[in-house]
Image (cartoon, grey):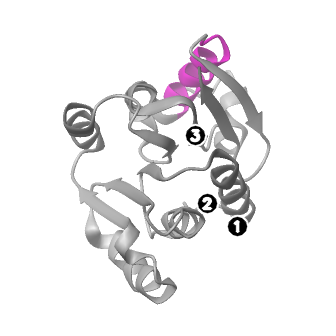
Amino acid sequence: MQSSPEQGALIAVLLGMLGARNALEIGTFTGYSALRTALALPEDGRLICCDISTEFTDLGKPFWQEAGIASKIDLRIGPATETLDHLIESGGPNSFDFAFIDADKVNYDAYYERALVLVRPGGLIAIDNVFWSGDVARPEVNDPDTAALKALNAKIHTDERVTRAVVPIGDGLTLAVVR
């Protein structure tokens, strides 16, 4: 349930290449990917994290403090779709350079669509767990999470709004550059 160190390193390199200043994380869990992202952002960078509970996010906060990046992180607790809708209304389209999606799988499509509005052209959307332990390749597996991932993978494969690649790192990471 946590991003791999290799994935964190790759995302940090990509953030540097993008010159990212404003990042969005959908699904924070214990805050490891938020830590890696915030460390990769410049001093004046900001990361908005969306999660539904403080139970696990509170575990990461001391590490954010220790790393000296807590001031870059704005943790918003509540349904991510509502937080994203608010960001669209308040900050407007194209207000982020990067979005990382790693939350409840059944809502990945809703998060992806909102990220497409929020991330600027040339910005990057990274989507975790797209292999789902190989279940996305098994026709007989169709639980709600797997079905949602299968549908999103198929959608992104033909989505003309992005240039995409799937990287076999961790549990599969889709990188989608917004056109």
- Whether residue 149 appears in magenta in the rendering, the answer is yes
Q: Which residue ends up furthest to the right in the rendered image?
A: 168
**How crowded is the residue under tag 2: few (<14 C-alpha within 10 Å), some, or many (20+)?**
many
Q: Residue 64 is drawn in which quadrant?
A: bottom left
In this picture, residue 40 sits left or right of residue 5: left
In this picture, residue 62 sits left or right of residue 137: left
Picture layout, residue 145 above or below residue 65 = above
Residue under circle 2?
Answer: 3
Q: Which residue ends up furthest to the bottom in the rendered image?
A: 66
Where residue 127 is drawn, which disc sits there?
3
At horizontal 21% and vertical 51% (from top left) the residue drawn is 78
Instruction: Pinpoint residue 179: horizontal percent, then vertical percent.
Output: 59, 20
Residues marked 1 and 3 touching at CB (< 8 Å) = no
Q: Is residue 143 visible?
A: no
Judged from the image, the secondary structure of the residue bearing numbered disc 3 is strand
Instruction: Pinpoint residue 153: horizontal percent, then vertical percent.
Output: 62, 24
In this picture, residue 77 sits left or right of residue 8: left
- Disc 1 versus disc 2: distance between alpha carbons? 7 Å
Looking at the magenta stretch, what is its main secondary structure?
helix
Range drawn in magenta: 146-159
Q: Residue 108 is drawn in which quadrant?
A: top left
Q: Amino acid at mark 1?
A: Pro
Judged from the image, the secondary structure of the residue bearing numbered disc 1 is helix
**How crowded is the residue under tag 1: few (<14 C-alpha within 10 Å), some, or many (20+)?**
some
Q: Amino acid at mark 3?
A: Ile
Q: Amino acid at mark 2?
A: Ser
Residue under circle 1?
Answer: 5
Picture layout, residue 85 above or below residue 97 = above
